[in-house]
Amino acid sequence: MIPPAFEYLRPKTLPEAVGLLQQHGDDAKILSGGQSLIPMMKLRLARPSHLIDINRIAGLSYIKEDGGFLKIGGLTREAELEASELIRTKYPLLLDTATVIADPQVRNLATVGGNLAHGDPANDHPATMLALGAQIIATGTKGERVIAIDDFFVSLFTTSLNHGEILTEIRIPIPPAKSGGAYFKLERKVGDFATAAVAVQVTLDGQGAVQKAGIGLTNVGGTPIRAKSAEDALRGKKLDAATIGAAAQAAADAAQPSSDLRGPAAYKTGLIKELTKRALARAAERAGK
Amino acid sequence: MAKKELIKLKINGEEREVAAESRMLLVHFIREQLGLTGTHVGCDTSNCGACTVLMNGKTVKSCTVFAVQADGAEIMTVEGLPSNGALHPLQEGFKEEHGLQCGFCTPGMLISSYALLKKNPNPTEAEIRWGISGNLCRCTGYQNIVKAVQFASKKMAQGGK
């Protein structure tokens, strides 16, 4: 399948890229990893007149801790997250997530920024970023804007990025001690989108009770879902079977899946309940260490 | 005549300069403009990995990359597997262990395995299966592909090149 013709632009700097985006209006799209956009262009579901390739812009790919945040550059490849010692040791939720995105070839090109900016509830990072309480940094002609992750996902394929903005950084508040997270995804086969998936991040207090909790759900709605009532059901309680069970039910109640080739809606709801239990158990283990 | 972009790249060690429309996929560029038909178009929907090539040392699905993105890049296709006039141990492994039937997935399997062994010269079976998890095979059931990669890993460890 061949996309329609488009004008290909390759800016060398971020201001140049933002300028081009402004200049060419609604029909211009950013080319980051291209692993979601190019398949859509091949099916002619996306028909940008101008493609702005940001892959040659220096300084957009990094993983570092700074000023109380884990900062990930928008152009950071999933494979780089997988290979990062920092991520492996301190942010296992992110490693869990990156590992189950597509397959090795796709992960070599796919970017964390693109996974979020594409606005697809079937992508994996959105639920994880919801669980982590992340911030999105959007760079436009007026400079940088901080968008709270809870305000980022608007509807299917729509985020709160303004048209002339590029997602340049993801900031995650560095979790305190006694924190742990996990991502559990069920897929029909390796590389598939989630039939359903759950991201969990918890912080425990000195007595082992939940001080803070974040729970994100993948591919069970038009946007990724933050299961707030499930989080509320955990606060102040120890992560025993009863508490986990109650939170898992609340997470299932928050899911709004559609029936499709991956399964009936009721099956996906049941999955959310079970995956939430498993993710909470794993997060508790990791927080306890 | 549609606008063409000039693409300068190194393909299997050779510098080439060829023009193509920006919408031309890397897989079509490799097959049609460069005449290297070892790389296959399988599903065309970014699933099967038959189009896998090495771009700047990393495996990519060339049906999901525009040729213009390869400007200034180094590409290796299956034709470029280093062989010193003989077969690369991976090619020998696929032959010895019957790692192919129709052969359609094989170029992609070879490139993914090549990249895997570069990074991890002595992989476990689980690591091999994970390493080729972006490549689908409809014929073999993967068993002999795994054996082929194990054959190559052993041969390369013994200094076979």
Image (cartoon, coloured by chain):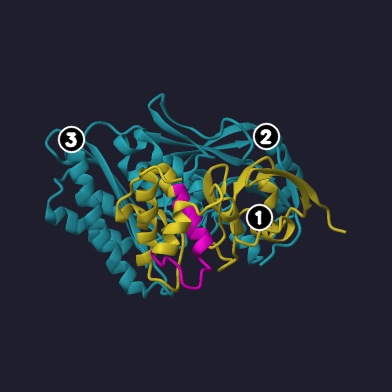
At label 1, which amino acid type do we have? Leu
Q: Quadrant of residue A36?
A: bottom right
At label 3, which amino acid type do we have? Asp
Q: Which residue is pictured at 15% across the width and 41% down the height?
A: A209
Please name the color used to draw chain B: yellow
Give me the disc on residue B26: 1
For disc 2, the neighbor class at 10 Å (few under 14, some 14 to 19, many from 20) is some
Q: Secondary structure at mark 3?
A: loop
Asked whether A35 or A125 is in front, the reply is A35
For disc 1, the chain is B
x, y percent for residue B80:
59, 50
Give the CA separation, mark 1 to mark 2.
Answer: 33 Å
Q: Secondary structure at mark 2?
A: loop
In the rendered image, residue B114 lying in the magenta stretch gets the answer yes
Please name the color used to draw chain A: cyan
Instruction: Report which residue position mark 3 lands on.
Output: A205
Q: In the rendered structure, which segment of residues is drawn in magenta?
A: B97-115
x, y percent for residue A99:
38, 50
In the rendered image, residue B15 lying in the magenta stretch gets the answer no
Asked whether A62 or B12 is in front, the reply is B12
Question: Mark 2 vs mark 3: which is more N-terminal?
Answer: 2
